Image (spheres, coloured by chain):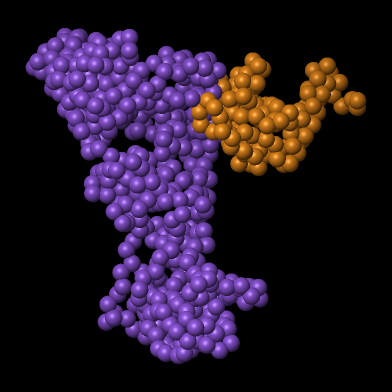
Amino acid sequence: MDSWITQLRKGLIELCILNLLEQGESYGYEILQSLQQIEELIVTDSTVYPILSCLRKDGCLKVQIKPSVSGPPRRYFSLTSLGRQRAREMNLYWNNLQTAISRLKSGKVGEKT
Amino acid sequence: MNLPKELTARIAEHLSNVRKNLGTLPSDEQKEILQSVESHIYDALEKRSRETPTSALLDAVLAEMDPPESYSDLPFVPQKKKSWRKLTFILCGLAVVVLTVAGIKGWENKYPNIFEHWNHNGKIFEGVGVDTFRMGATRKQLIKALGVPDKGSTETFLQWKNNHHVHCLIDEHRGAFELRFDIGFAGTTTKGITFGSSEEDVLAAYGKPDRIVTNNQAKMLEWPAQGILVWLTPENGVHQIVVFPPYALPYNQPAADSNANPVGRWTSVDFVSAPELFNPQVKSWPKELDLKALTFQSNGQTDRSFWTWSEGILHHSGDNTDAKFFIKQIDGKDYLFMEWMSGDVMLQWQPSKYYVLKREDLKLAPPSQLNPVAYEQTPHTFKVGDDIVLNEVLCSSRQFAIGDTVTVKGQYSLSSQSEATLLLTCTGGQSSTTETQRKSVTKGSGEFELTYVIPYQGCSHLAFYDKVTHKSFWNLWFGTKEQVEEIEPTRKSMQSAGTDISAR
């Protein structure tokens, strides 16, 4: 896969994870299952779990370990205040970007909305 | 979810392969990712089946997941630099493996069931095995004899179920140490038990089993001293025979002492799969013990900064794990059993093994090794009319450290009570005392000399104790400057509260 798609996907997956966790805490497998509903993202375990780890390390997510009947304890991820802020900033940037690209495609660059 | 050993071994292998591909990520991130991958596998298994998962189910789950190599393809995972030299080395290695496998494959096809060609007279020897498929055989020997193991074999588990109906547990140190024979294997034990034999036949051959395990479908009967166990069902009789090195019956241990105080120094003596398998006469762990000793301090600390303890739990601040521990008195000695939270426990969800530590005997140093030392002491708290004067403090070192012998000499005068006990201990709950560290005194005055060994990190404490209430009514602490400074807040709070510490 081309490098730019990989990089774009990584950013979008981050955005999706943050938005998903806005709705409440979740654990790795559940997050993966939810994201896999967006086919275009092409989300797999080797993509999501390292990103979850990065976001946790960046202070955007916090982890709570809870027992699981299926096996080892699950790591439940939830947003920190920094994570919520990051989600707001990313959503704002994403919306502005979409609008700008739409304008560009329709030849309306420079017009104020 | 309880998984068969074979499946947990395969999961461990998958995790190990993922780990190899995580490049130079920091270890904490690697650990997080591995925990997520492991949880994923268990969650996916459970989603597919509420019953005990099979090997085929695990195959399906792993097939849906990314191969371990995918974890090295990510732009945010730092990569190790590759070189042509390394690539050449790998290609050469691969070539050797391919040629070796091809050679063995050809040999295997020539003899589809090697056991038919072995001179074992159809006998499975208890505690030994069959010919080359025997206790202690190396991986290389087994592969040479039986051919390439079936898919699903790992570093610690080898199987030849398709051709030979056998599998085994193996490790680098012991070689093969548990040999399993399944239905289809043409052989009987030396006592005539074979596949399909009834429970009555088995009991008649081997006698009363020492261990019985039952689950919904099957029953396991084990004779440890004979090196054999069998799995059977009421309908089909014996369906698996397992042999292993004979081992002594578990030592008849007393129950754990829930009131025992762990404060003090402990030396590691063994590492066992289960507490009941510990026998003080026979060390079962063949290798050197990594943890040599551990000191439990009265303030909940240990001599390892990452471990703290409270009420039978040892907490590891780095791993964020809680290991249970308990104390048993065996043959008059205290033994501490401590869960060992290894990677097997944390990542593979295996039952924990146990470190066994023995409370260190506190031996008094001979008088020739004791010298007068400088010391600090707190102001004493006392009842009017009572007094103790320290004339001399002797110690086997200047540090008043754990294991040091301390002797105090002085004079006392007792007027508030008709009798009392003069006791020299270490602060924080010393659980037992000896004759040399206490003296019964009566009203009046006299001289004393008390000696003890400092059992753990703390401040030496000299006190009068009431013979009836066992409460102290005259207290003095002494030791190094640091030790005395550390105890001072406690002393002050006792003084202001007007309370005394209890004799322990």
Camera-side residue: B173 or B106? B173
Direction from residue A53 to residue B127 in the image, left or right: left
Q: Which chain is orange?
A: A
Camera-side residue: B69 or B327? B327
Q: Residue at x 65, y 39 (%)?
A: A62
Query: Residue B179: x percent and y percent?
Result: 24, 24
Q: Residue at x 38, y 46 (%)?
A: B255
Camera sees residue B132: no
A8 lies above or below B173 = above
B58 lies above or below B84 = above
Q: Which chain is purple?
A: B
B108 lies above or below B286 = above
For residue B174, what is the image quadrant? top left
Camera-side residue: A108 or B322? B322
Tell how many labels: 0
Direction from residue B333 to residue A1 in the image, left or right: right
Query: Residue B112: x percent and y percent?
Result: 19, 9
Camera sees residue A100: yes
Query: Residue A78: x percent and y percent?
Result: 67, 35
Query: Residue B364: x percent and y percent?
Result: 31, 73
Q: Residue at x 54, y 27 (%)?
A: A69
Camera-side residue: B209 or B316? B209
For residue B16, what is the image quadrant? top left
Q: Residue at x 41, y 62 (%)?
A: B264
